[in-house]
Image: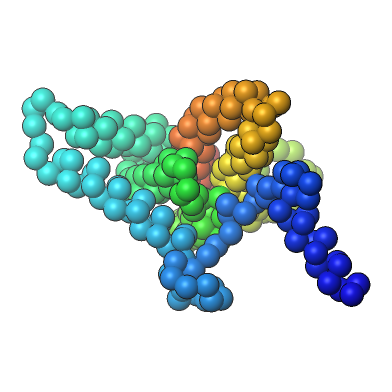
Amino acid sequence: MATETAAAHGEAAAHGEGGGLVFHPMDQFIVKPLFGDGPVHWYTITNVTLWMAIAILGIAALMVMMTSRRATIPSRGQSVAEMAYGFIYKMVEDVAGKDALIFFPYVMTLFMFIVFANFLGLIPMSFTTTSHFAVTIILALAVFLTVTIYGLMKHGTHFLGLFWVTSAPLPLRPVLAVIELISYFVRPVSHSIRLAGNVMAGHAVIKVFAGFAAIAVVSPVSILAITAMYGLEVLVAFIQAYVFTILTCVYLKDALHPGH
């Protein structure tokens, strides 16, 4: 009897006992199988898989299909593709230098994937893939390994000069070297958390306001708050893609010019 009573209370709390409101802002980040309700394995096709595939198809549609018939007077799709191309090209050249343009295709791919994934996550009932650390940490580790391996291949042991601050007084250099070494290996952590954390926080806040919108008394305020937060998230979707990309360029500069 006690067990049945506890279960009844739990069910009532989940559905909002006495007409109350119960919502879970983090439910939108749950990874679920696309087919069936079984456990998620590494080979399971999930909602994450679906929206990552949609992002890739969207990028291909913009960068390939929209530019396949290049015209002197560009269409809207061609204009957007050319603006994105020029924007990232100039970013790589200005931040990392002309010799970093060999990495332009990689940086362009990173930016387009992140910005598409972020904006797709703003569609109602969609899934924001960049809100998961499993996605962003892979992107960040790929940048970290690319920078480290290329820097060692290009400069050999001179790449380690990145950690030796020659402009500092000699007694301080060993201490600074330890600090620089720690900060270098923390890069993929901060690089990934910055993106996933900002995206996740914004979506969770919108879900909280959406839950309160069901209450008649606070509904108008909640709707205004949702509208304001949604507008902010549109900016965040682009800004976080920009920040991730420009930090990638800064790290590439270290690989190309470790003494600077």
**Number of marks drawn:** 0
x%, y% of residue 30? 58, 59
Color encoding of the figure: rainbow
Residue shown at 78%/50% (left/top)?
17
* Residue 176 vs residue 109, the one in the foreground: 109
x and y percentages locating residue 230 in the rendered image = 53, 31
Kindly tell me whether residue 256 is visible in this rendering.
Answer: no
Along the horizontal axis of the image, is 140 left or right of 103? right
Q: Is residue 70 left or right of residue 40?
A: left
**In the depicted view, which residue is nearer to us: 195 or 248?**
195
Q: Residue sitting at 71 percent across and 53 percent down?
A: 15
Q: Residue at x 74, y 38 (%)?
A: 169
Q: Quadrant of the N terminus?
A: bottom right
Q: Residue at x 35, y 37 (%)?
A: 88
The reply, left or right, for residue 74 in relation to residue 44 is left
In this view, which residue lies farthest toward the right?
2
Residue 35: image location, x then y, percent: 43, 70
Q: Where does the image place residue 93, in percent across and percent down from the top left?
A: 36, 35
Q: Where is 205 relative to 22, above or below?
A: above
In depth, the one of 73 and 46 nearer the eye is 46
State whether residue 200 is above or below residue 225: below
Instruction: Answer whether residue 200 is visible to the viewer in this image.
Output: yes
